[in-house]
Amino acid sequence: MDKITILWADDEIELLKPHLIFLQEKGYDVITATNGEDAIEKSKSKNIDIIFLDENMPGLSGLETLNRMKILHPEIPVVMITKSEEESIMEEAIGSKIADYLIKPVNPNQILLSLKKILDNKRLISEKTTTAYQQEFRSIGMTLSDKLNWKEWCDVYRKLVFWELELEKSADESMYEILTSQKNEANNLFTRYIENNYISWLKGNDEKISPLMSHQLIKKNVLPVIDQSQEPVFMILIDNLRYDQWKILQPVLSPYFRILEDDLYCSILPTATQYARNAIFAGLMPSEIESRFPKLWLNDEDEGGKNLHEAEFLADLLKRNRKEYKFSYTKVTNYNDGKKLVDDASNMMQNKLNVIVYNFVDMLSHARTEMEMIRELADDESAYRSLTLSWFEHSPLFEFIKKISESKVKVVITTDHGTIRVKEPVKLVGDRTVNTNLRYKQGRNMNYDKKQVFEIKNPADAMLPRQHLSQTFVFARKDDFFAYPNNYNHYVSYYRNTLQHGGVSMEEMLIPFALLTTR
């Protein structure tokens, strides 16, 4: 590796010879300058990796030199060194995007620490992260060998997501591959856990070990917040928001909100919008919605929008629970809807509850399947998260959240289901009445390998609508997807590595619920 070249500008550079010798002995190449003009000229003719800049120099001051350096070499990190502890100087230097700020007298070890922090930061963090995950790998592996309950599964998933986000910053691709393998193993065990317990949860056999599920979310987690709050409550449901996506959005919100609760709840099956989101706002399972609202519920094969009556469902839920809240319901499906949401923010402050359903992330996941350009932009999980973050930071939703943060409010951020990147095809044969979703199928006379799916022969057991006596629901497990034998190779090639939902996986079912309050 080439030597690191340091440019050190100080009018008393002769007094710093011990520091210079120390750095040279450590393998650094040091170029010196005694004033700002000289430093600027030398930076033009040399390949400089980092600049140490004295704040108080005759002629061109350190801050003036800094501003000119940033124009010439915005990529070179600058460390400001000063005798002064004046806050104004410190603020101006920090505002000019310096890499570090040191107060004289400085010792050689301080300089060395600053260099390592700035130049070796990524490498050191990568090495530490790799070592830490190696230790955690064994711990997670031992945990997975136990018979886990719901809370323990949530803890495992949180850890896997944490390390996924940490390791993607690392240069060690091999460790990321090991994590991916461990995550696949966890998903395999998680699907068995769901198969063994899901029906039992719905029957209410043991509420102490049952997770909070879609149809219970508002009654158990949102209504108590409203009852205990003097301020308005905003429930923001971002369709198809995975837990890992929530974790990368969280730091963006931290300047505006404190997080009071950061939890996971369980999406019902199918983990598809028409089932999970209707269940949330109705406070009922799909078969119960169909029974209570026969004219409003639409099954898979029915024509028309499947989520057009959520406001009516919510009104009924509130009425059943004797809550006479003044509330609003807003669905955002495009940019103009988002801008109108921002404009309406002040009016919403008059309501006890404001529900906002934001559809962008779901549309992004579908677009990734259908559009080659989006597929290239979100080629892997890290890129998909990055695209989500970029959208959020420039979205009307973030503008709206910042606007309501100016008032005293509580905010619930949640979703209806997650999504998973599918990889392995599972053959299934069905007639024209079978739905098109790649992660779940329902209908009559379907042929499939029972060992490869989660099968529910009687929809009533899962509180799902039953249209035919012989109707069956089957769900894809872990990262599988259903493929028809006709034109099989083309079908598999097109849908492999796309983002899908509807089935059984940690990514689809373990989904975020967060409660925030303004700072």
Image (cartoon, rainbow, N blue to C red):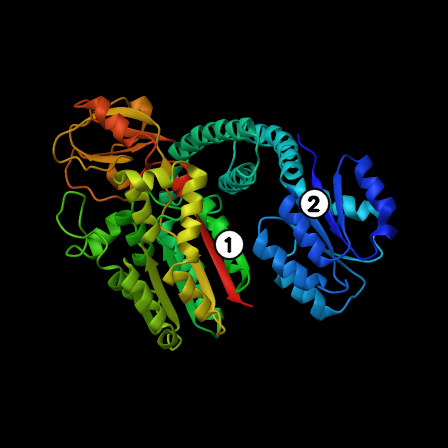
Query: Would you place residue 472 above or below residue 297 in this image?
Result: above
Residue flagged by tag 2: what amino acid is it? Lys
Question: Viewed as shown, does residue 322 lie left or right of 389?
Answer: left
Q: What residue lies at 27% left-to-right and 26% top-to-bottom?
A: 493
Q: How many marks?
A: 2
* Closest to the observer, 31 or 188: 31
Residue 36: name its quadrant. bottom right
Using a 10 Å C-alpha cutoff, classify the residue at mark 2 as few (fewer than 14 neighbours), some (14 to 19) or many (20 or more). some
Q: Which residue is mark 1?
A: 250
Percent coordinates x, y for residue 41 in the rendering: 66, 51
Q: Earlier in the sequence, mark 1 or mark 2?
A: 2
Helix, strand or loop at label 2? It is helix
Residue at the image position 78 percent from the left and 47 percent from the top: 111
Question: For the C terminus, which image quadrant?
Answer: bottom right
Crowding at dot 1, Cα within 10 Å, few <14 / some 14-19 / many 20+, comes out as: some
Residue 236's disc number: none
**Residue 178 x %, y %:** 53, 27
> Residue 249 placed where, x, y %?
48, 53
Of the pair 364 and 507, the residue shown nearer to us: 364
Q: Nearer the viewer, mark 1 or mark 2?
A: 2
Q: Is residue 7 found left or right of 322 in the rendered image?
A: right
Q: Which residue is found at the position 75% from the left and 50% from the top?
A: 8
Gap between marks 1 and 2, in whole Å? 25 Å
Regarding mark 1 in the picture, which secondary structure is present there? helix
Image vertical order of residue 337 relative to residue 465, above or below: below
- Name the disc covering residue 117, or none: 2
The answer to whether residue 25 of the structure is visible from this angle is yes
Kindly tell me whether residue 323 is visible in this rendering: no
